[in-house]
Amino acid sequence: MSNENLPERPPYETAHISDIPHTASGDSHGFQLVGEWKQIRHYFGIREFGVNAFVATEDGQEIVHSHTEFANDDESQPGDEELYYIASGSATVKLGEETRQAPQGTLIFVGDPGVERSVTADTAGTTVLTFGTNPGVEFIVSDFEKGVTPPARWRQ
């Protein structure tokens, strides 16, 4: 789809997390996302790494579903490294067989794409920022993200 009629991307931009609309995921790729998924990468037009926010709308929601980060769409590529930041609230993080409490301000780095991970919000309003990239590989938008992403705001 052409985006030539869109305005040019500005040289910088700011936004409050509440300004970024959440994306309805539907029942895509065999799982349903709960809470609110805010596509920060898409909102700003970031091209080199993934960044999202997941916001719990109820206590006890698994806002980052259980998954690994092996390359889903191209098995010849390495999997993602991911960084999670508990921006507000608190969460229970599962990393492999280990469970950890993560209060506001906690950073969790998962460098091994094979480690199964999930994040469950302890309370509604818990917000988790996620950052990910394949080291040394050009950023590839996943098939899942392509399937649910709203139209671009800027020409890229």
Image (cartoon, grey):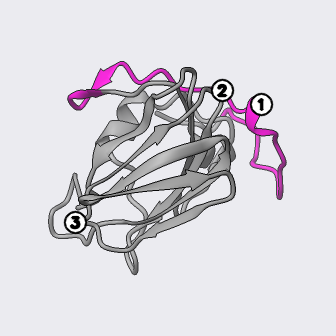
Q: Amino acid at mark 3?
A: Gly
x and y percentages locating residue 56 in the rendered image = 56, 29
Disc 3: which residue: 114
Residue 106 magenta-highlighted:
no
Q: Quadrant of residue 42?
A: top right
Residue 26 magenta-highlighted:
yes
Q: Residue at x 51, y 25 (%)?
A: 35
Upstream in sequence: badge 2 or badge 3: 2
In the depicted structure, whether residue 14 falls above or below residue 108: above
Q: Quadrant of residue 96?
A: bottom left
Query: Within 10 Å of the Cα at label 1, are there few (<14), some (14-19), or many (20+) other Cα atoms?
Result: few
CB within 8 Å, label 2 to label 1: no
- Identify the disc placed on residue 152: none
Seen as rendered, the residue at the extreme left is: 75
SS for callout 2:
loop
x and y percentages locating residue 22 in the rendered image = 59, 26
For the question of whether residue 42 can be seen, the reply is no
What's the distance in space between the residues labelled 3 and 1, CA to CA? 34 Å
Q: Magenta region, mostly helix, strand or loop?
A: loop
What's the distance in space between the residues labelled 2 and 3, CA to CA? 31 Å
Q: Amino acid at mark 2?
A: Pro
> How many dots with numbers?
3
SS for callout 1:
helix
Lateral position of residue 78 relative to residue 40, left or right: left
Lateral position of residue 11 relative to residue 156, left or right: right
